[in-house]
Image (cartoon, grey):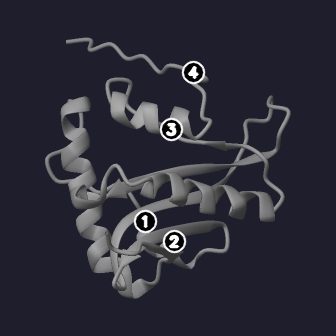
């Protein structure tokens, strides 16, 4: 088995990260009928360069095989907390799935959040994406709210 290492993403990783993003969108498209045919999710320059975000990549032989980020988000004024971190871009190359890679990325991001004095993190997952839900629950996430939608046509 290959040795997997974890590090902060750099701008040099951007071409691979753009591929990861499109693969993630393709994977999620069956869960969301309103995704545009040609879309992107992330501002990679911000996630890589901002002090308010941390983008982690897992690598094998220096080549990125997985990603995940956390960024600081202001909480709603009616919440007890003032800010939290939001996690996203959880992607693993299919050849490396099932090896706990995302669990390790989440742990790195969790430690970063704690190091900057933030003690709550959140993420979103499609309700039908049961494999992702199981992975997040295994790491300690709990369902907090369900977003509902209705087509009006």
Label ID, residue 128: none
What crowding class fits label 1: few (fewer than 14 Cα within 10 Å), some (14-19), or many (20 or more)?
Answer: few
Q: CA distance from mark 2 to mark 4?
A: 27 Å
On the rendered image, what quadrant is the N terminus found in? bottom left
Q: Position of residue 119 (x, y in %)?
A: 79, 48
Residue drawn at (22%, 44%) of the image: 27
Q: Is residue 74 above or below residue 147?
A: below
Residue 94 picture quarter: bottom left
Q: Position of residue 142 (x, y in %)?
A: 60, 27
Please tell me which of labels 4 and 3 falls first in the chain.
3
Element at label 4: loop
Q: Are marks 2 and 4 in contact (CB under 8 Å)?
A: no
Q: Position of residue 12 (x, y in %)?
A: 37, 88
Residue drawn at (44%, 71%) of the image: 57
What crowding class fits label 2: few (fewer than 14 Cα within 10 Å), some (14-19), or many (20 or more)?
Answer: some
Label ID, residue 46: 2
Left or right? Give the position of 106 relative to 65: right
Please tell me which of labels 1 and 4 falls first in the chain.
1
Element at label 2: helix
Which residue bears the numbered disc 1?
43
Left or right? Give the position of 133 relative to 80: left
What crowding class fits label 4: few (fewer than 14 Cα within 10 Å), some (14-19), or many (20 or more)?
Answer: few
Residue drawn at (18%, 48%) of the image: 26
Label ID, residue 136: 3
Left or right? Give the position of 135 relative to 30: right
């Amino acid at each position: 088995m290959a040795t997997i290492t974890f590090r902060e993403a750099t701008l040099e990783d951007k071409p691979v990260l753009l591929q990861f993003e499109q693969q993630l969108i393709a994977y999620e498209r069956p869960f969301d009928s309103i995704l545009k045919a040609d879309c992107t999710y992330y501002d990679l320059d911000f996630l890589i360069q901002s002090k308010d975000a941390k983008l982690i990549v897992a690598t094998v032989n220096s080549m990125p095989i997985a990603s995940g980020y956390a960024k600081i988000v202001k909480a709603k004024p009616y919440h007890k907390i003032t800010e939290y971190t939001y996690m996203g871009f959880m992607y693993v190359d299919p050849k490396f799935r099932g090896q706990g890679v995302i669990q390790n990325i989440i742990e790195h991001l969790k430690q970063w959040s704690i190091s900057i004095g933030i003690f709550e993190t959140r993420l979103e997952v499609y309700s039908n994406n049961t494999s992702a839900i199981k992975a997040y629950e295994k790491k300690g996430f709990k369902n907090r709210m369900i977003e509902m939608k209705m087509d009006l046509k």
